[in-house]
Image (cartoon, rainbow, N blue to C red):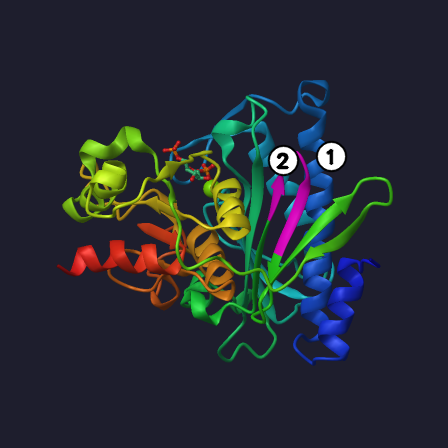
Amino acid sequence: MKRISLTQYLVEQQREHGRIPAELRLLIEIVARACKTIAIAVNKGALGDVLGSAETENVQGEVQKKLDIISNEVLIEANEWGGHLAAMASEEMDTIHVVPHRYPQGEYLLLFDPLDGSSNIDVNVSIGTIFSVLRKVGHHHGRVDEITEEDFLQPGRAQAAAGYCVYGPQTTLVLTVGEGVAVFTLNRETGSWMLTADQVQIPADTQEFAVNMSNLRHWAPPVRRYIDECLAGKDGPRGKDFNMRWVASMVADVHRILTRGGVFLYPWDQREPHKPGKLRLMYEANPMAFLVEQAGGSATNGSQRILDIVPGTLHERVSVMLGSKNEVQRVTGYHAD
Ligand code: AHM
Ligand code: MG
């Protein structure tokens, strides 16, 4: 079988299907190239002095790892000069990063979690990069300094593209431009991303859930009910046994779900009642929700479709339930009961 590269795939999307403008194609190519650079740093591990803590904190009060900071810098540097972006936002930066005046300003806004699954870096378990692309809306008359955080506060359904890269046994890039989900695998010999799966579909039913079970006693009753019923297996109300997986890297857990189905939960918990959840809406939940919906799955916060949530702030958090449609519908339904 003759495989096509990411570049060919994007040119086809642009030329034959008219699905993406040239600027968006450039943006995706640049993000993909940055992910290659991050993958090289990840692979070096202790030899590259990239493991461990940077001894700094991000805006959310989390201690940053060296790779969090390296990956953030790689993505910023790669994306500044192309003329495709107006501004960027990241889990690792308090405020937005407007493209400097010396470069032309483009039509897009890029958000990312540069290195997701930080707790897995030092233990050599899969980690990843998540990204989300929005269009600059409103009347800016092309002046860079007019871009503000407000321009980013669009619901996830407005995304022009989204994706993630998994740094695992294989380095894999998963992408949607709103016409299904495509998977590319990095060929290390040639340095090319090659299309290895297209129009990925998540089965509607599953017997596998992903959740951090150590938090069980803190969850709200609908989530406890859902998991209790899964755990009861054949003898319980579901009448079938469930398997459990929890990588603690959202990219890896979502990738498994895209590959063979499943349901992923990171629900609200009562320890910090005012915090809707752990995961961030704009650069974790939204891009993953877009991918999952494009693959025929669902994503909600228990009461609402993730992609319909209008963000109030850049770093806002959200409760997440995503994956196989029928399971997400069930756990969401328990919230309405
Ligand atoms: P991070 O962006 O700081 O790495 O945090 C997000 C990660 C997700 O990838 C993962 O699903 C979750 O945090 C794991 O949380 P926990 O350590 O509670 O299992
Ligand atoms: Mg993250």
Figure quarter occupied by ligand 1: top left
Mark 2 lies on residue: 168
Q: Quadrant of the N terminus?
A: bottom right
Disc 1 and disc 2: Cα gap in Å? 12 Å
Q: Give coordinates of residue 72: x percent, y percent.
A: 60, 42
Q: Residue at x 81, y 40 (%)?
A: 188
Q: Residue at x 75, y 65 (%)?
A: 9
Can residue 300 be seen in the rendering of this structure? no
The main secondary structure of the magenta stretch is: strand
Q: Is residue 246 above or below residue 323?
A: above
The three-letter amino acid code for the residue at tag 1 is: Ile
SS for dot 2: loop
Quarter where residue 224 is shown: top left
Left or right: 176, with 326 as reference point = right
The three-letter amino acid code for the residue at tag 2 is: Gly
Any mark on residue 80, and which? none
Q: Which residues are magenta?
A: 165-174
Q: Residue at x 67, y 74 (%)?
A: 20
Label 1, residues with CA under 10 Å away: few <14, some 14-19, many ≥20: few
Quarter where residue 218 is shown: top left
